[in-house]
Image (cartoon, rainbow, N blue to C red):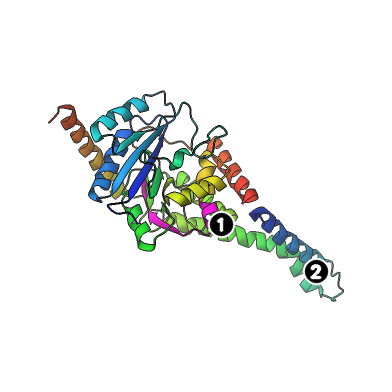
Amino acid sequence: MPGHSQLLSVLLPTYNERENLPLAVYLLTKHLDASAMDYEIIIIDDGSPDGTLEAAKQLQKIYGSKHIVLRPRARKLGLGKDDDDDDDDKSQSSSGNPNFIIIMDADLSHHVSTFPLKQKEGDYDVVTGSRYIAGGGVHGWDLRRKIMSRGANLLAQILLQPGVSDLTGSFRLYKREVLQHLVERSLSKGYVFQMEMMVRARQLGYSLAEVPITFVDRVYGESKLGGNEIVSYLKGLLQLFAST
Amino acid sequence: MSKLARALLVFGLFAVAWVVLAWDLPGLGLTSQWLQLVWAMPAYLLVCFGCWALATVGIRLSSFRDCPEAAEELRAEVVAARIKCIFITLNL
């Protein structure tokens, strides 16, 4: 369980998040400092053209290199395995041995400390944030978006039976060795990777727990839900339905 | 076995059972009332499933919170972060 001697690595994959990043790091440090955990925030920038990496370097100066670690990558790789990605970016840290790893989006910065607390309750292997359980939710979505979200979620529950209520929520805590195992077993990338990790975790018999998260639709920038996103979601679901 | 294979197996078993009953292959001597029921069964199950799915989405939609308090809290955090940023920039 997380404590003084145990290290928590927070992985922040970023792409064009220059405006979100300072707030995300501010909130993370605030909550993690208050929880008295050893932590590091690893910013993995995929060559953002908007200067996210420069912002990250500034943040490193402010918060110190003990807490902010930069791992820039040359191009957009997203999450999941890459053909020429020999090492595993997602389980590396500056010190090499975090006990727990949180992977989150830079625009989801709420209450990170609830994840280690939940983990501690039942020594869970994976703790995942859910917008769909009591206490969770989304701010700033219209009815159409909510219907789509609920419909898409129901379809995922029927097809994949993942054992968790929110498959696409990109805010999760893993035990380091569990994450490594899941990455080895997962085949997909990006969006589908998020879903596959949970489906595989259940298949492999890992213990899963959920904490409610509130998602305030992007403070800066705009989140989109177009035809392309819907098609790629459906393709991802079917791909996992056929392969897991 | 993948979830797709499992689903196909279940669907296949159901389809076989339906064909066997609909054409009364074992010669059970089903009355026309029973045969009507068997013939309508796939459509009936499909409609039931659709109703259940719609009702489930509806119920879950009604409990999908809008979280105004989270938005308010985040706004306050943004202000606090900006103030901290000003202090750091001014080296206070």
Is B36 left or right of A5, judged from the image as shown? right
Q: Is residue A147 visible?
A: no
Is A194 left or right of B67, judged from the image as shown? right
Q: Please tell me if label 2 and label 1 are on a single chain.
A: no
Residue at position x 24%, y 32% in the image: A62
Residue B83's x, y, as percent? Answer: 18, 34
Which residue reaches farthest left? B92
Q: Is residue A210 visible?
A: yes
Residue A31's x, y, as percent? Answer: 26, 47
The image shows residue A75, relative to residue A101, as above or below, that is above
Kindly state the secondary structure of the residue where label 1 is placed.
Answer: helix
Q: Is residue A210 found inside the magenta-colored segment of the image?
A: yes
Please, what is the three-letter code of the amino acid marked with disc 2?
Leu
Kindly state the secondary structure of the residue where label 2 is placed.
Answer: helix
Q: Is residue A194 found inside the magenta-colored segment of the image?
A: no
For the record, the magenta segment spans A198-218
Dot 2 and dot 1 residues touching (CB under 8 Å): no
Q: Nearer the viewer, mark 2 or mark 1?
A: 1
Q: CA distance from mark 2 to mark 1?
A: 36 Å
Please, what is the three-letter code of the amino acid marked with disc 1?
Gln
Q: Give the labeled residue for mark 1.
A: A203
Residue A73's x, y, as percent? Answer: 45, 29
Q: Give the labeled residue for mark 2.
A: B21
